[in-house]
Image (cartoon, grey):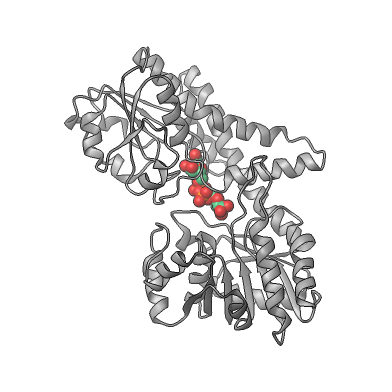
Amino acid sequence: MRISIIGCGYVGLTTGLALAETGNQVVLVDVVEEKLRAVEEGRSPFYEPGVDEMILKHRSSGALSTTTDLGRAVEGSDITFIAVGTPSREDGSMDDTFIISAAKEIGDALKTKDGRHVVVMKSTVVPGTTWNTIRPLIEENSGRKAGPLLGIAMCPEFLREGAAMHDSLHPDRVVIGTMEDETFEVLDRLFAPLDSRILRTDPTTAEMIKYASNSLLATKISFANELSRICERVGVDVYDVMEGVGMDSRISPQFLRAGVGFGGSCFPKDVSALRYLAREKGVPTPILDGVMENNEIQPGHLVQVAERTMGGLKDVKALVLGLAFKPDTDDVRFTRSLPVARHLSSLGARVAGHDPKATENFRKEAPPEMSFFDDHEEGLSWADVVFLVTEWPEYAAIEWERYPNIRAIFDGRRTIEPASVKDIAYWSMGSPLPEP
Ligand code: UGA
């Protein structure tokens, strides 16, 4: 099939690559020419394992092309995916600016196009958006009604950054939210080669499935984190506790890793948007409120334990290892390293940071007095105290005995084996509290 994808971010690009891989002709559309230029040159506009190779493969096979001309892309395709950003506004509500302008332009392009066209919402949007906002805009601008000539669907994306290519090619499930049988059949055929479970539903339920999934995953993490603070006081290790809890097949061991909290572009944004929607509808959300409140406690808690253990952090050289919100990405959106660095700064520590990929992105937000090391070994030779905030594999391989200057390590992500540290005080979140 001929596919156009509006938005060349994580979701758009990896969806496009997965569809190229399964035998479709894909054109990527973006207003940011730099992103498209990167794809044309065979590289990903962001750091993501495996994406460069897939771009090169499908640039040379001719299955993947790019353009800034949305109208022409829509005209030359049978299905258009909307995969533009839906960031949070200050008040937690979803900013729909980009999806609205995409819908209008798609509608305009359809005015002169012959034949049936399917528009699929892939961006994460507040339940009701595709059917109540996007469909009418496309209808108005194209002069067609949803039905025989215009298909409307919502297919949420469940990929994880750092594993985006794998998740796009092997999704746990594909959710197709549409009111029309014909649209379902076309999308069912399109996604069939992914060999995944397919769920048919309506667009608004599909949108809610996405919010509910991310909110439940965030809830599991916040639950593990709350439990971890209790376990620390009781004198047991939350990882041992969660191992036993996760053996219950009704619960599963996934997303019960306690630590410094969740970050990224999705969990905080989606939980906030769902709370905002509930507030608008007059529905109280004590669980979701608690999920966010609990997440904010963790970075401060890590630093507080360090302060108590060290007897103060003033003028202490504190190295934050890991600035990305998780390993295998250069994404720093809502990274927990930022509140950790700010807390350390406010207590008078001399803060420095290191990340294998994300330093440049982090610098823009960092406390002005924070410095950075290109090489983590240099940072380790400088530091008095180390805070592990992102579990990059190279940090797990550090030979700690080479750094006698380091007095203590505070691990926010269970990054290293305690046995690998001798003669240095080591504490990992969720384990019994250290003696002051
Ligand atoms: C998340 C979901 O996992 C994806 O299914 C979803 O498609 C995506 O959001 C999205 O909506 O686009 P992502 O944000 O890329 O994916 O990363 P995750 O691997 O879910 O991690 C999110 C955060 O939670 C990270 O900061 C991670 O360190 C933290 N986390 C994760 C924990 O603190 N504990 C855990 O047990 C798991």
Would you say residue 196 is visible in this rendering? Answer: yes
Q: Would you say 17 lies left or right of 57 here?
A: right
248 over 104 or under it: above or below: above
86 over 405 or under it: above or below: below
* Res 186 → quadrant: bottom right
Q: Would you say 169 lies left or right of 200 here?
A: left
Q: Nearer the viewer, residue 66 or 33?
A: 33
Q: Would you say 271 lies left or right of 64 here?
A: right
The residue lying at 26 percent from left, 21 percent from top is 407
On the image, the x and y values in percent for residue 334 come to 51, 41
Q: Nearer the viewer, residue 375 or 155?
A: 375
* Res 148 → quadrant: bottom right
The residue lying at 29 percent from left, 44 percent from top is 394
Quarter of the picture holding the N terminus:
bottom right
Would you say residue 250 is visible in this rendering? Answer: no
The residue lying at 74 percent from left, 58 percent from top is 129
The residue lying at 48 percent from left, 71 percent from top is 17
310 over 39 or under it: above or below: above
Image label count: 0
